[in-house]
Image (tube, rainbow, N blue to C red):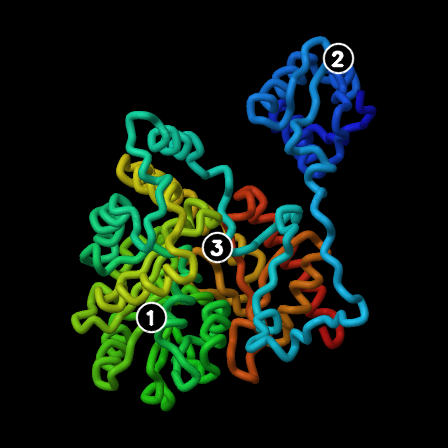
Amino acid sequence: MIECCLQISLDKDRGLQEQLREVLVTSILAGRFIKDESLPSCRSLSEQLNISRNTVSLVYESLCADGYLISRPRSGYYIAPQYDPDYLSQDAPVEIDSDSLSAPNWDKLLKNSPSQFLTIHKPSNWMKFTYPFIYGQPDANLFPMEKWREAARKITSNMHPHDWVLDLIDQDDSALVTQLRNHVLPKRGIIAQPSEILITLGTQNALSLVSQLLFNEQTAIGVESPVYLEAVNTFKLQTQRIYPHAIDSQGMQLNERSKQCDYFYVTPSHQAPTGVSMSNARRQALLQHAISHDQIILEDDFDSDTNIEQRPRPALKANDQSGRVIYMSSLSKALSPGLRLGYIVAPAELVDELRALRRLNYRHPPTYIQYQLAYFLSQGYYESFLRHYRENSAYRWSILKNALDKYLPMCRYTQTKATAFWIEAPKEINCETLAWRAAHKSILIEPGRNYFLEEDAPSNFFRLGFHAIAPEAIEPGIASLAQVMHHLQQSPGN
């Protein structure tokens, strides 16, 4: 019998059979068991792991059924021949002359170095902060798990077609496209034909596809400043001609560089990151400018489903009569960013080319997820979730607003009901230093300097999200942040 000690740190939130099977499969595939030596008996392994013999027996039997183990009566369980370590390594090793070895020079081979692009860094352990005022992470407790599981059960049942197992080549699930056309886009004032819609792996992927297809090194792009930085980083893979346009209380301002632009990238619903809603006058001016100078507008409607305004303005695309607006949005930002599903609405001839480009990149988003989300939408579960989400967001927004007014009256912020607060601190406050000191008090904020493209970018801005933090922690978190800011103001040189 194989004498081995299986290292398992049992997780109380996972099934014992699941965890034991995982460890055994890993050990089998890693070649840790020896041919013709039996595995520990059910009794021996149950005593070693302090779990029931029945649990071990069920796992052994399931591994036999799946071909990992074989059972020999009155002898025990053995690894199947095809997982014998000697069998797996029977091919002669490849021999290479060590004197000729040389590593490639990747610095010379790289055409771009995205790792060097300026970005907004968020700690991977943000969940361990007491006051995580981080943007873009939802409250996992709001996820409609039972309804999502029901959608999974329905599409995998024998009563439902199993077309989701097929490769759709370059197409999308027609049911999901129908749900978009009938239940999602009309809320933003957009009427689109199926041929004008493409499903993507989120808005970031939509930006990547559009820029790959339409931009080259001569392309000039007008962007807002401050700006969603990952959009700019995506554009930089194609061109360096990126022209910032300042933001005021009505949104993006056209300037002397605007006529030189081939494209504009805008977030008119709630500007990212300031939260400003572009006024109707500015929207009309931008659309007219694009028509007059033969330009294209990329509209990133990132919070289309999470908008908590009482009467949100329609999308810019809703007023596009000339086909100059390429509309992008997310289907998963509120529900679960990890689902990575979004879409593009554009003229059919452009969508045809985007579809062909997508096919070369990854063919299409996972069919299973498309089917599951289509069912979720069709049953009204998504709309029901969004109502609850918006109510919860409005509640959190009010708590944070009141806390800011109470503890940080010296700061200014955008009054629109966006999904984050863009804060202007007193000019003497360096918010990168503020963020560093706040982190030592378990407060996580996002300094705003990196959102600006100008060389003389201000350093007294920061952003506060309110979905990742518990509602009851918002006010004490702002009170603690106010103390950190007060101490910073008292410190010589900040």
- The amino acid beneath tag 1 is Leu
Q: Which residue is mark 2?
A: 43
Q: Which residue is mark 1?
A: 298
Earlier residue among tags 2 and 1: 2
- The amino acid beneath tag 2 is Arg
Residue found farthest to the top: 74
Specify few, some or many for label 1: CA neighbours under 10 Å numbering under 14, 14-19, or 20 or more. many
* Quarter of the figure with residue 99: bottom right
Name the residue: 27% across, 78% down. Answer: 286
- The amino acid beneath tag 3 is Lys
Name the residue: 80% across, 24% down. Answer: 2
Q: Secondary structure at mark 3?
A: helix
Earlier residue among tags 1 and 3: 1
Residue found farthest to the left: 321
Frontmost residue, 130 versus 256:
256
Residue 446 placed where, x, y %? 58, 62
Q: Secondary structure at mark 1?
A: strand
Q: Is residue 469 visible?
A: yes
Q: Which residue is mark 3?
A: 401
Give the mark toward the camera: 2 or 3.
2
* Quarter of the figure with residue 407: bottom right
Q: Which mark is residue 310?
A: none
Q: Quadrant of the N terminus?
A: top right
Relative to 131, is 35 on the left or the right?
right
Number of on-image labels: 3
Earlier residue among tags 2 and 3: 2
Question: Between marks 2 and 3, how big is the CA–CA gap?
Answer: 61 Å
Name the residue: 56% across, 47% down. Answer: 469
Q: Secondary structure at mark 2?
A: helix
Q: Quadrant of the C terminus?
A: bottom right
Task: Please determine whether, in this image, residue 465 is positioned above or below residue 100.
Answer: above
Specify few, some or many for label 3: CA neighbours under 10 Å numbering under 14, 14-19, or 20 or more. some
